[in-house]
Image (cartoon, rainbow, N blue to C red):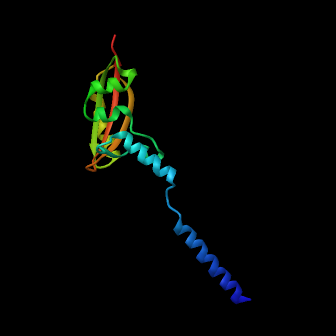
Amino acid sequence: MKKLIRMFLLLLLIISTSACASTSGMTSAQNDSVVYNEKKQNHKKLLFEDWKYRGFGQTLPEWFESAYEDNLVKIKKSVQQLSSCEIVILRGEGINADQAERVMELEKPGLPEGYELYDSFWAMTGEGKYVSLSLYYKEIL
């Protein structure tokens, strides 16, 4: 009887470990969505390897790459709400996302009055540096 129980437990252990080893950590649907998000960013080369909430499936905001390049015209074209506004970009860089955001926060006192926050976001560049950008706008009267 003891041999039968031992054999059953051994067989159960083998089956359970082989079941865990044969499954992938990511389903094909999840894998496809990651590829889709990366393709949507840039077909030639990925400028950013990681960004805020990427792990939850969020894509990089349309304005972020333009703001990284300090291209205000492109930002106004991509974000219709900001097309008739003055725009200010605050930038912070660091070795991780927290440091980049703290450096960016130090730039806030120099922000002219009357500007409102549109969005704030961070990303990691291909070189492994983190950049945090805040987009502020002010309605033109």
Which residue lies at the image location 42% right of the left edge and 40% below the top edge? 59
State left or right for residue 15 relative to residue 79. Answer: right
Rendering coords of residue 81 (x, y %): 40, 21
Residue 19 location in percent, x, y? 57, 69
Q: Position of residue 100 (x, y in %)?
A: 31, 43
Taking 124 as reference, is 73 above or below it?
above
Question: Foreground residue, 106 or 115?
Answer: 115
Q: Residue furthest top?
A: 141
Quarter where residue 103 is shown: top left
Of the 4 image quadrants, the one containing the C terminus is top left
Quadrant (top left/top right/bottom left/bottom right) for the N terminus: bottom right
State the residue in front, 29 or 100: 29
Q: How many marks?
A: 0
Taking 72 as reference, is 60 left or right?
right
Locate residue 41: give its quadrant.
top left
Location of residue 44 in the rendering, given as x and y in whole percent from the top left corner:
29, 43
Using the image as rendered, state which of residue 64 and residue 140 is in the foreground: 64
- Location of residue 129 with respect to 12 vertically, above or below: above
Please tell me which residue is depicted at 59% across the width and 77% down the height of the picture. 14
| Residue at x 32% of width, y 27% of height | 75
Q: Tell me: 63 left or right of 30.
A: left
